[in-house]
């Protein structure tokens, strides 16, 4: 009986991993669903943090609505690119100007989960 349960559990975990991978966004998905839109990152303390991914390759954002101006430069600009089915970005000031890339997975209509290359995770809403 225990062997059956272990095989079932292993199969279920494999199926869930395959389903999650199936929804992982590829370059074409990122270009059609993200680029040219505003992405609203869910903030840990509530609210949303908007990032605008312009077709020109520029990305900009503002933390003014969240009151981040007390802690960091409230707005910043940088550039984005797609590399190996990951959305990458680099701001001038934020994150000390370091480049970072994200795996994106669709979780519902106009919703994504992101996993940053350093392991951080979060959710976002795709706006217009």
Image (cartoon, rainbow, N blue to C red):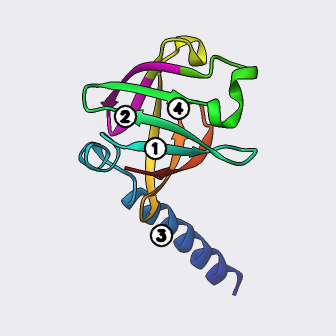
Query: Which of the two labelled residues, at mark 3 and mark 2, occupies the earlier sequence position?
Result: 3
Q: Residue 80 in magenta?
A: yes
Rendered view: 25 above or below 23: above
Mark 4–mark 1 distance (CA, rounded to whole Å): 18 Å
Q: Which mark is residue 116?
A: none
Per the rendered image, the range of residues in magenta is 76-89
Query: Which of the two labelled residues, at mark 2 and mark 1, occupies the earlier sequence position?
Result: 1
Query: Which of the two labelled residues, at mark 4 and mark 1, occupies the earlier sequence position?
Result: 1
Residue reaching furthest to the bottom: 1
| Residue at (70% x, 27% y) in the render | 68
| Residue at (49% x, 12% y) in the render | 92
Quadrant of the image containing the N terminus: bottom right
| Residue at (46% x, 44% y) in the render | 39
- Could you tell me if the residues under marks 3 and 4 are in contact, i.e. CB atoms within 8 Å? no
Q: Position of residue 27 (x, y in %)?
A: 27, 42
| Residue at (41% x, 29% y) in the render | 88
Q: Position of residue 40 (x, y in %)?
A: 52, 45
Query: Which of the two labelled residues, at mark 1 and mark 3, occupies the earlier sequence position?
Result: 3
- Could you tell me if the residues under marks 2 and 1 are in contact, i.e. CB atoms within 8 Å? yes
Mark 1–mark 3 distance (CA, rounded to whole Å): 29 Å
Q: Dot 2: few (<14), some (14–19), or many (≥20) neighbours within 10 Å?
A: many
Q: Which residue position holds label 2?
A: 53
Name the front one of labels 3 and 4.
4
Q: Which residue position holds label 4?
A: 117
Under circle 1, the secondary element is strand
Q: Position of residue 93 (x, y in %)?
A: 55, 12
Mark 2–mark 4 distance (CA, rounded to whole Å): 19 Å
Q: Position of residue 107 (x, y in %)?
A: 48, 62
Quick one: 56 or 69, which is closer to the camera? 69
Under circle 4, the secondary element is loop
- Could you tell me if the residues under marks 3 and 2 are in contact, i.e. CB atoms within 8 Å? no
Q: Is residue 70 left or right of residue 65?
A: right
């Amino acid at each position: 009986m225990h062997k059956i349960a272990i095989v079932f559990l292993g199969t279920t975990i494999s199926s869930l991993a395959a389903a999650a991978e199936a929804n992982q966004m590829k370059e074409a998905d990122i270009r059609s669903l993200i680029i040219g839109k505003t992405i609203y990152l869910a903030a840990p303390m509530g609210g949303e943090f908007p990032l605008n991914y312009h077709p020109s390759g520029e990305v900009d954002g503002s933390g003014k609505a969240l009151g981040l101006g007390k802690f960091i430069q409230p707005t910043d600009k940088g550039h984005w690119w797609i590399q190996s089915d990951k959305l990458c970005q680099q701001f001038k000031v934020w994150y000390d100007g370091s480049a970072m890339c994200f795996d994106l997975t669709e979780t519902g209509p106009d919703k994504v989960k992101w996993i940053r290359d350093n392991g951080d995770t979060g959710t976002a809403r795709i706006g217009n």
